[in-house]
Image (cartoon, grey):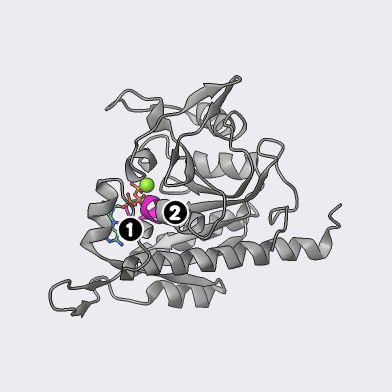
Amino acid sequence: MGNPINAQGARSPLIPHVKSTVAVASGKGGVGKSTVAANLAIALSSTGAQVGLMDTDVYGPSVPMLMGGNNVPHVVEGKLEPPVEYGVKIISMAYFLPKDEAVIWRGPMLHKTIQQFLGEVRWGALDYLIMDLPPGTGDIQLSLSQTIPLSGAVIVSTPQDLALTVASKAIAMFQKLNVPILGVVENMSYYLCPKCGHREEIFGHGGARAAAEKLGFPFLGEIPLDVNVRVQSDCGKPVALDGSTPYGKAFQEVANAVAKQVDAAGSKVDEGIQIE
Ligand SMILES: Nc1ncnc2c1ncn2[C@@H]1O[C@H](COP(=O)(O)OP(=O)(O)OP(=O)(O)O)[C@@H](O)[C@H]1O
Ligand SMILES: [Mg+2]
């Protein structure tokens, strides 16, 4: 614990007081990356950690909406002071775009935005900076991995084969970029009927665990498919705010598993590097 460097062995000068940076990614759209990123940030924060949440999906930013969107950033001494929602510091392109306006940018502009979201935001001292990534294996993923040393990536997948195949592509991309894979989360894992308690495995179940084990990565947990997760996300009150529900508990377990993997990635570096 308390390791001040991230998995790749150096803090970034852009965010010198951030201990670990965790990208939440998937190969495929709509599998719940943003939902997992927001709830992970809240669950980590509820353990007393200092947490930031960076929405790197400049084309479809959704983090402020998920996190309540009550506050906006302000400029303080020439830098952006990120708004705080539920104890988590947030930055997103959504704060800077007129509503319903689309971003049509090429790689260099995306790269510049990522750099600004890191270096020109007053993140201060953080234990975790969680990054919600857009779907796929494109410019943002590349830009992020090249701009700062990431502690690791959390891969979100639904249980069906197709999603898992695409998730493997995201894993392969991060490996090529030398970003450690912290593990795989299975979202929309099973459906629990709120009326009768019957468990229905709509997309199959356990596929992500099996795939993680086969590929040799940790399995970080499973999140049920539950209408409350969607409804509470839509009204800006992520379910992890209440750890007593089955889905709140599921996110807390994922957060504990992620924290453990971040620590393990840090200690691997510790073995090889002398910290002053
Ligand atoms: N476990 C869940 N139970 C019920 N609904 C869920 C669950 N996880 C996500 N959702 C819903 O599924 C939809 C897609 O989720 P989300 O926006 O988090 O996916 P995403 O992977 O970030 O999508 P994109 O690729 O477009 O960024 C949202 O409406 C969200 O509320
Ligand atoms: Mg998203």
Q: Which residue is mark 1?
A: 239
- Chain-order first, disc 1 or disc 2: 2
- The magenta region covers 30-37
How many residues crowd around disc 2 within 10 Å: few (fewer than 14), some, or many (20 or more)? many
Q: Nearer the viewer, residue 56 or 160?
A: 56
Secondary structure of the residue carrying tag 2 is helix
Taking the magenta stretch, the answer to whether it contains residue 31 is: yes
Compared to 50, does 92 lie above or below?
Answer: above
Q: Residue at x 42, y 31 (%)?
A: 93
Q: Position of residue 102 (x, y in %)?
A: 33, 28
Q: Which corner quadrant of the image does residue 59 belong to?
A: top left
Distance (Cα) linking label 1 and label 2: 9 Å
Residue 213, given in percent of the width and then of the height, sits at 51, 77
**In this picture, is 176 found above or below 264?**
above
Kind of residue at badge 2: Ile
Does 237 appear in magenta?
Answer: no
Which residue is at the far left?
195
What SS does tag 1 mark?
helix
Quarter of the picture holding the N terminus: bottom right
